[in-house]
Amino acid sequence: MNVKKFTAPTSREALRKVREALGPDAVILSNRAVDGTVEILALAGDDAASLAPHSADSPMAAPAPQLDLAPAPAPYASDYAMQPEAAAPALRATPRPAPTVPRPAPARPAVPAAVAAPAIDVERITAMVADAVASAKASAAAEMSSMMSELRAMRGMMETQLNELAFASGQQREPHKTAVLRELLAAGFSASLARYLMDKLPAGRDGAAALQWIRTVLARNISAMQNEDQLLERGGVFALVGPTGVGKTTTTAKLAARCVMRHGPEKLALITTDAYRIGAHEQLRIYGKILGVMVHSVKDEADLRIALNELKNKHTVLIDTVGVSQRDQMVAEQVAMLQGAGSDVQRILCLNATSTQETLAEVVRAYQGSGLAGAIVTKLDEAASIGSALDVVIRHKLHLYYASNGQRVPEDLHLADPAALVERAFSGQAAPKFADADLPLLVAGVAHDPLLREVRLG
């Protein structure tokens, strides 16, 4: 029996060596790991067949003949005596050969009747292949994502540089646009809105004519309440919302005073949900006492539902809400409470004119909910420029009710006049903030704002 040993780093390599040396019919006798390698003992197919038991009708299965191993008897002496001459030559001529005794075969190791190759763990191999494929896909996806990010970065850089070159070339051809753009940016309007208006500026308008066209377009795109009757005569439930410190309580008192002067205190009700700030409830209660109006305090949606049900006979109900940062999750909870109160609560957003354009945009997105009824711009008297607030009103299509410019109740609350607000934005600006060389850097990389699609130019 010719048993051979094969070693290799892996089972696959060892099996390949077995097939090459012994053929595809080789029989695996053992498979084990030895010192980090795989050792296989294998036997050729022919040798394995000789070890298998033969069938009953095979000649090899017949029993071996019985051999007489006893020595032959020696001749008697009388035989030699009777025929001395004849017997001797016969013995010399035909000597008896010594009997051949077969030597027993060496002991062979017991071989099982059927030798089978060890079973292969198909599920484990499948899982390994699946893991390898998934790892390769993940690596390829990561490399592709990295490459796409680099391509996008390169594209953005090239677009910015080309826009800078194009804008610089346009400055030389149309210097009046540069002056108007500088005015818009100094007034606090965003670079995206300023660039959009510059691109739409009609040909042939320069200097004062170009700036006047810009002011007209801005005023046309500010949606404002034309008459207080749209709010005071219609009545309803109004909730003033916004971050802390924008003047919601003072604005609520101003609106309450206007309602009392028109309809009397019995037609008005005040509700506060601000149970967090110290003295917030007392402040509104003092205003209510001056106006002769009862102030109701609620804590949650259930309280608000009960209060609104009891006050449903009132012409106007004003709700002063607690101030919440636009990045606080309580904003969503507050919006849900007002929407689930069981009445048509119209939310009016208070916008602080002193805030930046980015902050105001965050506030609008946070408090938008299912839709705002309108907005009130507050603290105009404290703002160095109000272009940022007007920019947000234009781009987010907010309906502007009032503009507040002080703490006096109710004097410092005025109907929003678009033309007057735009004039205030340009007249109240400081010295130009940017040099001509800085303008290409400010507007070249501005991405297209989808909110500007609805800006009306004529």
Image (cartoon, grey):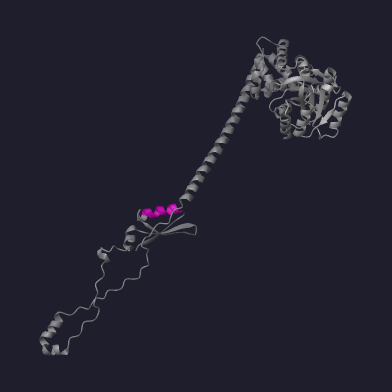
Give x and y (percent) for residue 448: 64, 23
Give x and y (percent) for residue 44: 35, 58
State the predominant SS element of the stretch in magenta.
helix
Q: Quadrant of the C terminus?
A: top right
In the rendered image, the vertical position of residue 299 relative to residue 206, given as above or below: below
- Position of 24 with respect to 386 (left or right) is left
- Position of 225 with respect to 203 (left or right) is right
The image quadrant that residue 325 belongs to is top right
The residue located at (10%, 87%) in the rendering is: 85
Give x and y (percent) for residue 431: 78, 20
Magenta-drawn stretch contains 16 = yes
Q: Is residue 454 visible?
A: yes
The image quadrant that residue 182 belongs to is top right
Question: Residue 173 or 305: which is nearer the viewer?
Answer: 305
In the rendered image, the vertical position of residue 19 relative to residue 256, given as above or below: below
Q: Is residue 431 visible?
A: no
Q: Which residues are magenta?
A: 10-20
The residue located at (75%, 31%) in the rendering is: 305
Magenta-drawn stretch contains 98 = no
The residue located at (86%, 31%) in the rendering is: 282
